[in-house]
Amino acid sequence: MKRKLVSALVCAAMVATVLAGCGNSSNTASTDTAATEETATDDAAAEDTAAEDTAAEDTAASGDLIKVGIINNDPNESGYRTANDADMKAMFTEENGYDASFAYSLKNDEQITAAQKFIQDGVDYLLLSAADTAGWDSVLMDAQAAGTRVILFDRTIDADPSLYEASIVSDMEAEGQTAVDWLAGQGLDEYNIIHIQGVMGSAAQQGRTGALNAMVEENDNWNLVTQQTAEWNAEKAQQIVQSVIDSGQDFNVIYAENYDMAKCAVAALDKANISHGVDGDVIIMGFDTNTWALEELLAGNWNYDGQCNPYQASYIDEVIKTIESGGTIEEKTIIMEEKGFDAETITQEDIDTYGI
């Protein structure tokens, strides 16, 4: 379906105003603070009997719990991250045999500091979702020397595979390629794209950016109107789109590397009365399959949303149990199954099944 290009000029009042739904960015606070730690206690359901309570206390006192340190990105970063963190907390409880502590940051150096502390504290396992792919070799070698086993989740890193036991991750390059292939299939005469990136250097950003950059380089009718990082921050994403609108540049695609940024990019379009989605002037693309985003697809307000599966805890638990029982890990890298969703074909069943 051919779509006309958008050229819009917006009055100064629109520049200053931020829609209420996007005024409070989800990840602002954590990027300015050091990695914080919290102990995951037995938040699972209360024991039914006093005898069961006593048994749990005896297990904890005996030192039989597996001690894990879990390093993740800020849970408020996105709906994906909130679901991922909740999944980890539900699994790594005393009831399930774990003594778990958590550290959060979107900054690599703060995550590395947290990892060093966990190693010093003598955790049995270090579970890591790295903010950046680089810079981890030294701390992982420290972990290996201390007898701490490392398991990666959510994101890959640039490190020797011998430094970690397993990697349970999304294939970010495949996510990006699937999205770009879908966009190419829309058959536009010209692609003028606002590209809103996540935190630079993260596996998600690299994978979702790489495929788009390659397509732009290979095709004269693919153009980047702007390519800027909003660092997963919804409010920054809205500002990026607003700046393009104010400049009067033509665009017909918004490619945002997560759903929060796409959501507030759309808010800027709505303020300017620019149509979007199915039969609209601007194609809207996001990632992470938040339930709200998938509902926007079903309503025709968005066009595409790429899945990023946040539920990795059960796989990690299985890896740990295999190691603890003396078994062998058959697959060092476990790739989560994921797909992309199109507004033209998505169903309510898809939303119920895959929404997070």
Image: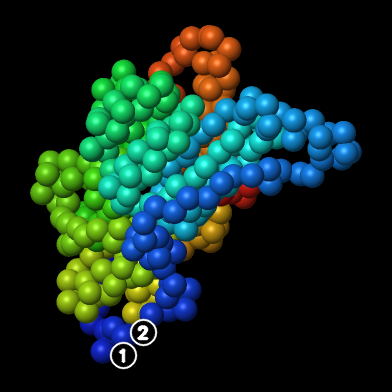
Quadrant for residue 277, please give it: bottom left
Check residue 13 in the rendering and tell me which mark sits there, or answer none: 1
What is the C-alpha distance between the residues marked 2 and 1? Answer: 7 Å
Q: Position of residue 200 (x, y in %)?
A: 24, 50
Residue 38 shows in the view: yes
Q: Is residue 312 above or below residue 1?
A: above
Alpha-carbon neighbours of circle 1 within 10 Å: few (<14), some, or many (≥20)? few
Q: Residue at x 52, y 46 (%)?
A: 85
Residue plotted at (31% across, 18% down): 162
The tally of labels here is 2
- Circle 2: element type: loop
- Amino acid carrying label 1: it is Ala
Above-or-below relation of 253 to 124: below
Residue position for label 2 = 17
> Does any portion of residue 276 appear in the rendered image?
no
Circle 1: element type: helix
Kindly indicate whether the residue at mark 1 contacts the one at mark 2 (C-beta within 8 angstroms): yes
Residue 54 lies in what quarter of the image? Answer: top right
Residue at 89%, 38% (x, y): give it.
Answer: 49
| Residue closer to the observer: 304 or 262 | 262
Q: Against 272, is 52 above or below?
A: above
Check disc 2: other Cα within 10 Å, few if <14, some if 14-19, many if 20+.
Answer: few
Q: In what quadrant of the picture does the N terminus appear?
A: bottom left
Q: Nearer the viewer, residue 4 or 178?
A: 178
Q: Amino acid at mark 2?
A: Thr
Q: Residue at x 51, y 33 (%)?
A: 68
Image check: 23 left or right of 211?
right
Q: Give me the disc on residue 221.
A: none
Front in this rendered view, residue 301 or 187: 301
Q: x and y percent of residue 215 in the render? A: 19, 43
